[in-house]
Amino acid sequence: MKLYYSPGACSLSPHIALQESGLAFEAIRTPTKTHQLPDGTDFYTINPLGYVPVLELDNGQRLREGPAIVQYIADQVPDKQLAPANGSFERYQLQEWLTFIGTEVHKNFSPLFTPGMPDEAKQLAKDRIISRLTWVDGELASKPYLMGQHFSVADAYLFTVTNWAKLVGVDIGGLANLAALRARVAERPAVQAAMRTEGLLK
């Protein structure tokens, strides 16, 4: 398999999932500004939408949305328990978390990375992020991970997007339960391996 990623972008989430899975894969750095791969390939020929992540299977099939990619990876190694079993109620709860993180947290960071975005719009986005993460913090009051006692791909996704907070001036320092989850995830060897590959850790 091949994972097309950009350092620190949302592609870190499936990168973590792949490291956790133990599956063989090639990580291909994908500059989001030039869209030119190390071998000279135009990334738009891989993903016409131009963004990461993209997971390319050995048979050439591709997935290009993070929540779908991480579930695919988890399902290849059910013994790793990165996601509950397909068809179970818990699996739908995982999908609920992945959707929430994608639409309510991830996408609200987008205006903060957009050049020329008015300050008023940026403040609205910051307020929405804090509101949503405050709710998440409350949900984590009685459990170490989003799904309960066990790490899942949803935790990797939440960790990835909340990594951006400091970069764009979103203060999440007061959210103690979220901070504890982030610390637990950051300590995982697979997370450190993915971050080291992306140049996020020395």
Image (cartoon, rainbow, N blue to C red):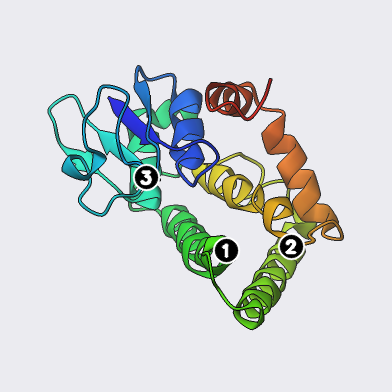
In-front residue for pair 178/38: 38
Helix, strand or loop status at disc 1? helix
Number of the label disc, if any, that sits on residue 146:
none
- Indicate the amino acid at tag 1: Phe
Q: Position of residue 141 (x, y in %)?
A: 79, 58
**29 lies above or below 113:** above
Q: Position of residue 143 (x, y in %)?
A: 73, 51
- The disc, 2 or 3, on the residue closer to the chain's N-terminal end is 3
Q: Position of residue 156 (x, y in %)?
A: 56, 42
Residue positioned 58% across, 21% down in the render: 193
Q: Residue furthest left?
A: 59
Residue positioned 37% across, 45% down in the render: 52
Number of the label disc, if any, that sits on residue 52:
3
Mark 2–mark 1 CB contact (< 8 Å): yes
Residue positioned 62% across, 39% down in the render: 150
The local crowd at label 3, few if under 14, some if 14 to 19, many if 20 or more residues have their Cα within 10 Å, is many
- Indicate the amino acid at tag 3: Val
Number of the label disc, if any, that sits on residue 109:
1
When asked about the image quadrant of residue 126, the answer is: bottom right
